[in-house]
């Protein structure tokens, strides 16, 4: 069989790419090493992710994708697919849990983002791929050789393809060398799914919270690390500690529960539904992410850290920029692929400084609640631009003034000289929503 495009990896990104390629009239094959349904991490979506998902649905005439871009429409259209509501981003500092930062990212519980229960979400997408007639093979781990075209061989598949998209999330089937040396973030994860986790707001909810504080990506932050807690409607909670490898090399799930009694209280009835996973350092980055006849999606090429839930949005943004290139002439495509690589790299570098800078601020909540505004202003500005039809790069990373602003404050944080009070003025050109306004007292309702 001869294909125009072979996509390796049927996570949400591989399946969405396959659906788009098919709509573009490309003969497409999607190959998955494992099987569906399966557990996957990477669950919390964001406005940037959901706007992109909705826009891909419209642009490529994939109407069944659109309801998945809002919690309310997801529940109405696909009640059988599990998800959870995400009104915004909640940060609680430990042990001083009175230090709180809540940033609403949506106006209400209908029009809010979702936590994707990936087991259901990814399996649903694969079923949609199969319905379109795209060739799909599971349990398939192909060997790749390249002549003018790609040759793909496994026990059950033998085919050629003109173009390969690597959507394997870091498995690196093309064997592209890695180089982590320029990445500042240095973290590892301890995570699983649980039942019996008490919603934070049931114990610590407050009148002045702009939304129920646990209908969110809940971040417990502490010196040297943080923990995410994401609730699904089916009673399952996804939770994980993310730890600075240098600051906390030996901490375990148990030792952290002992260290932080308020987290322990939230988890006192929790039962892991899967073995708890302990990762090594998570950061990875390939030395290149495109060639003449191949490209890696962002999560295949690079990963930093789940802080602020940027991964899925970056990957959807990559799909949006990559797929149209497949229709271009060879020369135009090569230029487009290089631009895709440069823009993805630029976004990863910017995100790395924001994430690493936040780690440096975890023990100083005043600093954290100001420095994190660099993320929120970049995200919000980009969302608004996109809604008004203006293209901006992921997290406003294409804007040199914004990049310089992040660099400026990141360098201060690293040198231990952060002047947090200056951030409000510096972000003014992109700040449409009153971020850094002291009268809000770290409680940002949606505007
Ligand atoms: C602890 C943790 C928490 C995270 N939390 C968030 C979050 O809250 N929000 C967020 O936006 N992002 C988060 N991320 C990032 C998120 O995981 C990724 O953005 C997301 O999984 C990307 O999806 P994907 O479909 O590209 O890749 P994946 O979900 O990794 O799927 C890749 C697929 O490829 C298959 N595969 C692997 N090798 C091969 C091969 N050789 N051939 C064929 N198939 C292959 C795999 O079996 C898998 O099905 C998190 C990451 C981690 C590590």
Image (tube, grey):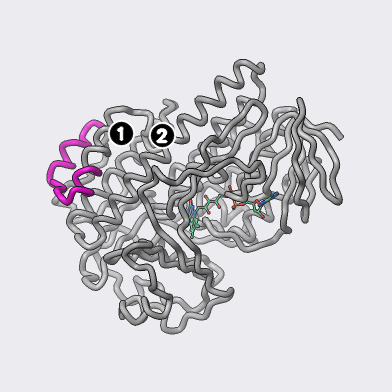
Mark 2 touches mark 1? (CB < 8 Å): yes
Q: Is residue 312 left or right of residue 119?
A: left
- Residue 307 x/y as whole percent: 39, 55
SS category of the residue bearing label 1: helix
Give the residue at x 47% y 35%. Answer: 344
Q: Is residue 392 left or right of residue 320?
A: left
Q: Is residue 162 something one can see in this rendering?
A: yes
| Label 2 to label 1: alpha-carbon separation | 9 Å
Near mark 2 (Cα within 10 A), the count class, few <14, some 14-19 or many ≥20, is some
Q: Which region shows up in magenta?
A: 410-429
Magenta segment, prevailing SS (helix, strand or loop): helix
**The image quarter in which residue 447 lies:** top left
Name which of mark 2 and mark 1 comes first in the sequence: 2
Residue on which disc 1 sits: 403
- Residue 145 x/y as whole percent: 76, 37
Decide whether residue 422 is among the magenta residues.
yes
């Amino acid at each position: 069989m001869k294909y125009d495009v072979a996509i390796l990896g049927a996570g949400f990104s591989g399946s969405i790419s396959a659906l788009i390629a098919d709509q573009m009239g490309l003969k497409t094959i999607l190959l998955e090493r494992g099987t569906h349904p399966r557990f996957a991490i990477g669950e919390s979506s964001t406005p940037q992710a959901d706007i992109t998902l909705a826009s891909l649905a419209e642009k490529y005439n994939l109407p069944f994708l659109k309801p998945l871009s809002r919690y309310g429409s997801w529940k109405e259209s696909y009640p059988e697919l599990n998800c959870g509501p995400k009104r915004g981003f909640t940060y609680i500092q430990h042990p001083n849990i009175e230090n709180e930062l809540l940033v609403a990212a949506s106006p209400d519980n209908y029009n809010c983002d979702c936590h994707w229960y990936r087991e259901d979400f990814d399996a649903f997408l694969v079923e949609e791929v199969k319905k379109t007639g795209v060739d799909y093979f599971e349990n398939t781990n192909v060997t790749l050789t390249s002549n003018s075209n790609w040759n793909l061989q496994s026990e059950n598949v033998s085919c050629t393809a003109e173009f390969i998209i690597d959507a394997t999330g870091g498995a690196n089937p093309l064997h592209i060398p890695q180089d982590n040396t320029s990445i500042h973030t240095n973290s590892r994860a301890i995570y699983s799914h649980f039942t019996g986790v008490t919603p934070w707001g049931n114990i610590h909810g407050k009148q002045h919270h702009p939304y129920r504080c646990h209908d969110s990506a809940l971040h417990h932050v502490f010196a040297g690390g943080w923990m995410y807690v994401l609730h699904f409607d089916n009673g399952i909670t996804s939770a994980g500690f993310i730890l600075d490898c240098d600051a906390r090399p030996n901490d375990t799930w148990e030792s952290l529960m002992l260290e932080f009694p308020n987290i322990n209280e939230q988890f006192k009835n929790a039962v892991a539904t899967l073995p708890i996973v302990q990762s090594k350092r998570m950061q990875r980055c390939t030395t290149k992410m495109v060639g003449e006849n191949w490209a890696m999606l962002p999560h295949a090429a690079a990963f930093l850290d789940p802080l602020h839930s940027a991964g899925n949005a970056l990957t959807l943004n990559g799909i949006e920029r990559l797929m149209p290139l497949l229709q271009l002439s060879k020369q135009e495509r090569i230029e487009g692929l290089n631009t895709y690589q440069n823009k993805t790299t630029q976004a990863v570098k910017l995100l790395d400084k924001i994430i690493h800078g936040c780690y440096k601020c975890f023990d100083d909540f005043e600093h954290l609640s100001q420095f994190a505004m660099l993320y929120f202003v970049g995200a919000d500005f980009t969302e608004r631009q996109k809604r008004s039809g203006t293209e901006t790069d992921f997290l406003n990373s294409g804007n040199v003034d914004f990049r310089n602003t992040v660099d400026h404050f990141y360098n201060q944080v690293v040198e231990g000289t952060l002047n947090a009070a200056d951030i409000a003025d510096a972000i003014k050109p992109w700040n449409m929503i009153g971020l850094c306004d002291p009268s809000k007292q770290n409680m940002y309702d949606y505007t």
